Amino acid sequence: DVFLMIRCQKTTIFTDAKESTTVYELKHIDDQLLEDSKTLGNCSFTNQTARHQAPGTVGLAFRMVEMFEQLQVEAFSSPPELPDVMKPQDSGSTANEQTVQ
């Protein structure tokens, strides 16, 4: 399986497919993109490049009369910094370590 993140402006669609899935089939998920006859594998989306923890990104632009609209993808927001109590502790010691005499 390949895992994809289809993005258009502030909209993100997560989906999965097979490497052999055609772009035509993918269009039924999100509407008009790429060339119909190509497979996702032909477009470099493989189980090595589009994993569930790092999905491949496909930009979504809608067709206007004779051309496509300009692709617009908003950047994801950054999470706030972790509070000190949630940050990793010094790797030299552990909370469960006990002194043996």
Image (spheres, grey):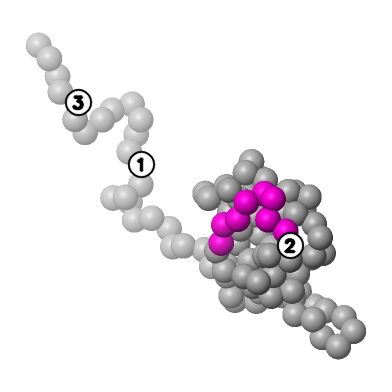
Do we see residue 81 in this rendering? Answer: yes
Compare marks 2 and 3 and give the one earlier in the sequence: 2
- Residue 37 in the image: state x and y as whole percent: 81, 60
Identity of the amino acid at label 3? Glu
- Residue 61 in the image: state x and y as whole percent: 74, 75
Residue at (15, 23) in percent of width and height: 98
* Apparent side of residue 63 relative to residue 93 in the rendered image (left or right): right
Label 2 to label 1: alpha-carbon separation:
43 Å
Image quadrant containing the C terminus: top left
* Apparent side of residue 97 relative to residue 4 in the rendered image (left or right): left
* 60, 70: nearer the viewer: 60
Residue 58, compared with residue 68, is above or below; it is: above
Compare marks 2 and 1 and give the one earlier in the sequence: 2
> Which image quadrant is residue 9 in?
bottom right
Residue at (19, 25) in percent of width and height: 97
Residue on which disc 2 sits:
23
Compare marks 1 and 3 and give the one earlier in the sequence: 1
Residue on which disc 1 sits:
88
* 59, 75: nearer the viewer: 59
Identity of the amino acid at label 1? Pro
Residue 101, compared with residue 80, is above or below; it is: above
Residue 63, compared with residue 97, is above or below; it is: below
Identity of the amino acid at label 2? Val
Query: Going by the picture, which residue comes out furthest to the left?
Result: 101
Residue on which disc 3 sits:
97
| Magenta highlight range | 15-22
Q: Element type at marker 2?
A: helix
